[in-house]
Amino acid sequence: MTAQRLFIIIGLCAAMLFTFATPPFQVPDEVGHFWRAVTIARGAILPRIERAGGVAQLEQGLSTIVFVFWVAPPTPNYKVTWPRFRTSWYVRLEPEHRATVTFPAGYTPVAYLPQIAAALLTRIIPARPVITFYLGRLFNALAYIALVAFAIRITPVLQWLFAAAALLPMALFLAASWSPDAMTIAASFVFTAALLRAPRTPREVALTAALGACVGLCKPGYVLIALLAFAVATMRGAARAIIIAATAAGFALAMWNASRSYAPVRPDAHVDPPAQIDCLRNNPARFAEALAHELRVNGVDYTRQMVGRLGMLDVPLPGPVIWAEALVLLACAWTSSVSVRVRAVAAMISIATIGGIALASYIGWTPPCATNIDGLQGRYLLPIAPVMFSIIAAPLIRRERIALIALAAVAAICNAVALYSVAARYYS
């Protein structure tokens, strides 16, 4: 069995189960992403911006369905009961009544393409809001599986590593939701695989550049993956074209954020981005101190989060699951090798990307001149997981069957544990 086939079998089964096992809106920021994608399908690509974020109107039922399930914040003992699901079925679309909703407007439609397709389809039918919700999750999961499977197929090396990273419980949990993280992870994997393939014709260069642009339009923090082009490009000007396309898209999204997004409303935390920038200007070492402190105190926890901290980040997975997934990632990285040049560039990409994400969190989510960094999550490492582990790639495991057995066992068991953990947390 190939890595691609194994990924499709386990990934599809786990993603489908996560789609229906995870209670509605018990994924980080899923309410805002649900409203954002649905309003895009209703034509509000450029919504009105107010202090709380993007504002648009949609059918009353698409607002009501959120309040049938949403509990803010969910208490540790919060359970989703059957009456909530029964009530959700009776919520109608009510197109004659309009509701005003607020959501984060900093994402472009590219990150929501599967969810937008589901929202458009259920608008044409039309369907009940609860069907729109689950169809959006389903489309997102299927798009994730298809894109990652394509990435595994085209990459010339590290196929088992791509499969192992994509089968992490956190990745599949996000894929089976309305989160744009699923498209970001999948697009980053396809872009990385296309670069490792080393584009050799103008058409391949153009397609790879387009993939880089898609990654930039999902989240600008991952455009540095394009630097791999320097390590693999065989055509004159190919690396330059790919990097320019990805950087331009990332810059465009940054400008989109500047004009369409908003500063987090957190008066209790005294977040003030302009004051934070002034602090860094006067004391550039402050960020380095905060990052060192964060890695020292929470570095191991970020690894746990990357493997899986599910629900509203309140469903941790057992320690053995974390260790098993970490070991299988290492084992899959040792199934093939990459050049020294690729390793060096991958190390630079990993360090720069992590630093960039940390800096953005420090400016946008942390009180001025704090010695810690708020807002960092281990799941932010998922899009660059193949790049990070390629640094230690080595042909130590030459028998493909070993990788097959190890990955199949760990992925199946750990995702089963993750599904059980979600069910135990949210259902009586």
Image (cartoon, helix red, strand yellow):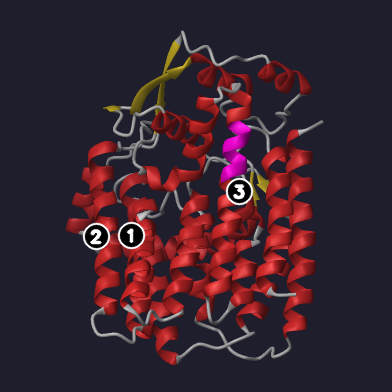
| Rendering coords of residue 255 (x, y %) | 23, 47
Q: Residue furthest top?
A: 96
- Crowding at mark 3 (Cα within 10 Å: few <14, some 14-19, many 20+): many
Q: Earlier in the sequence, mark 2 or mark 1?
A: 1
Q: Secondary structure at mark 2?
A: helix
- Asked whether the residues under the numbered discs 2 and 1 touch, taking CB atoms below 8 Å apart as contact, a structural biologist would say yes
Name the amino acid, label 3: Ala
Horizontal relation, residue 136 to residue 387: left or right: right
The residue drawn where x is 53% and y is 32% is: 121
- Crowding at mark 2 (Cα within 10 Å: few <14, some 14-19, many 20+): some
- Determine if the magenta segment contains residue 74: no
User: Majority secondary structure of the magenta segment?
Assistant: helix
The residue drawn where x is 53% and y is 74% is: 154
Using the image, determine if residue 268 lies above or below residue 316. Answer: above
Calculate the distance from the C-alpha at mark 2 to the C-alpha at mark 3: 28 Å
| Rendering coords of residue 301 (x, y %) | 58, 59
**Which residue is disc 1 drawn over?**
213
- Determine if the magenta segment contains residue 136: yes
Horizontal relation, residue 195 to residue 152: left or right: left
Q: Which residues are magenta?
A: 133-139
Q: Secondary structure at mark 1?
A: helix
**Which residue is disc 3 drawn over?**
141
**Which residue is disc 2 drawn over?**
248
Calculate the distance from the C-alpha at mark 1 to the C-alpha at mark 3: 22 Å
- Crowding at mark 1 (Cα within 10 Å: few <14, some 14-19, many 20+): many
The residue drawn where x is 44% and y is 91% is: 340
Using the image, determine if residue 9 lies above or below residue 124. Answer: below
